[in-house]
Image (tube, rainbow, N blue to C red):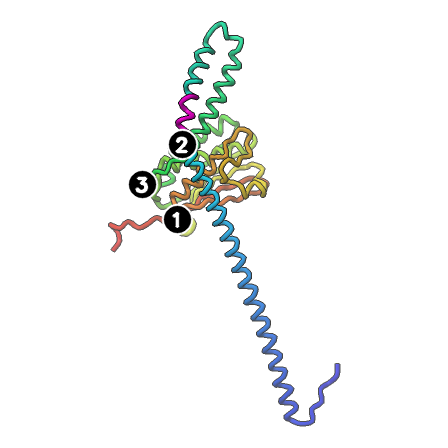
Amino acid sequence: MIAAKFCSIKDWENFVDLKRELIELKTQRLNLGKMVEDITKKLKKEVEKKERLELEIAKLERLHIIGQLAAGLGHEVRNPMTTIRGFLQMLQSKTELFTYKHYFELMIEELDRANTIITDYLALAKDKPAEMKRQCLNKLLENLFPLLVADAYSQGKKCNFEPEDIVELDLDSNEITQLILNLARNGLEAMTQDGSLTIKTFMDGQSVILSVKDEGKGIDQEHLEKLGTPFFTTKENGTGLGLPMCFRIANKHNAQIKIETKLDGTTFLVRFPPRKSDPLNES
């Protein structure tokens, strides 16, 4: 390294000034780099937020289309199906047709399955306002828990309920019950025998969280991105309408559903926003 030679004090002052400017430039470059990094992170978050919103809008649009189809066709299709089922039951009871009993049972079973699909369609089509009532989510779960335990027991599985102290919420009992049943039954079906389903409630800040965790194998990333899309299902006999119904119910309650999945299980987290203040109690 060549040492700088100074012929006068002025040369030294110029050198010091130059060094100071270089240090300032380096500091500015570091600051600019940090600013660019921060702006890039913010833009990335905004892009991800926009993509999530677009996905949610797409799901809602599909649900709207399904609702229109269901409202127009559901009842019309059900009527002839009911007639066919009645005649099949009548023919099934005839002695001379006993040889074909298995076929009649199979046809009736498939008609019932089709009827279940139509029922789900109609549930999605209903656009009636939710009948909100201020109540405790824990109380709803306590009433529903025996049914969930029975479902789990019949499959050789377990179901646990771990409530914490939570505030009351404005809820539609029937719709929240349907949401809990759908999430719980999905969790039970995702597990092998001896698996355990855990349902929790707790506070996160001012929000109430409903957690439904299974001990299944987790959800593949490619499937995770499609969850909540009408008709999408990984079940052999699934309709692909259970989760869309959950998203619709959550949306009507201004709640959000978050999914966390690993190789040892999946957790559905339903975040209910802070309840609105009662106008009568406001000062």
First in residue order: circle 1 vs circle 3:
3
Residue 152 vertical placement versus 62 (above, below): above
| Residue at the outermost top position | 96
Badge 3 marks a residue whose secondary structure is: strand
Circle 1 or circle 2, nearest the eye = 2
Amino acid at dot 1: Pro
Give the label on residue 273, or none: 1
Magenta stretch: helix, strand or loop mostly = helix
Neighbour tally class for label 1: few under 14, some 14-19, many 20 plus, Cα within 10 Å: some
Quarter containing the N terminus: bottom right
Q: CA distance from mark 1 to mark 3?
A: 15 Å
- Judged by depth in the image, the label closer to the viewer, 3 or 2, is 2
Q: Quadrant of residue 172?
A: top left
Residue 72 is marked as: 2
For the residue labelled by badge 1, is the local secondary structure a helix, a strand or a loop?
A: loop
**Residue 223: image x %, image y %?**
56, 40
- Residue 79 falls inside the magenta stretch: yes
Which residues are the magenta region? 71-80
What residue sits right under mark 3 in the picture?
133
- Magenta segment: does it hold 205? no
First of labels 1, 2 by sequence position: 2
126 or 252, nearer to the observer: 126
Q: Is residue 26 left or right of residue 107?
A: right
Q: Residue at x 44, y 29 (%)?
A: 118
Q: In terms of image quadrants, where is residue 225?
A: top right
> What is the spatial separation of the Cα atoms under label 3 and label 2, in whole angstroms?
31 Å
Rendered view: 53 above or below 175: below
In the image, residue 17 above or below residue 101: below
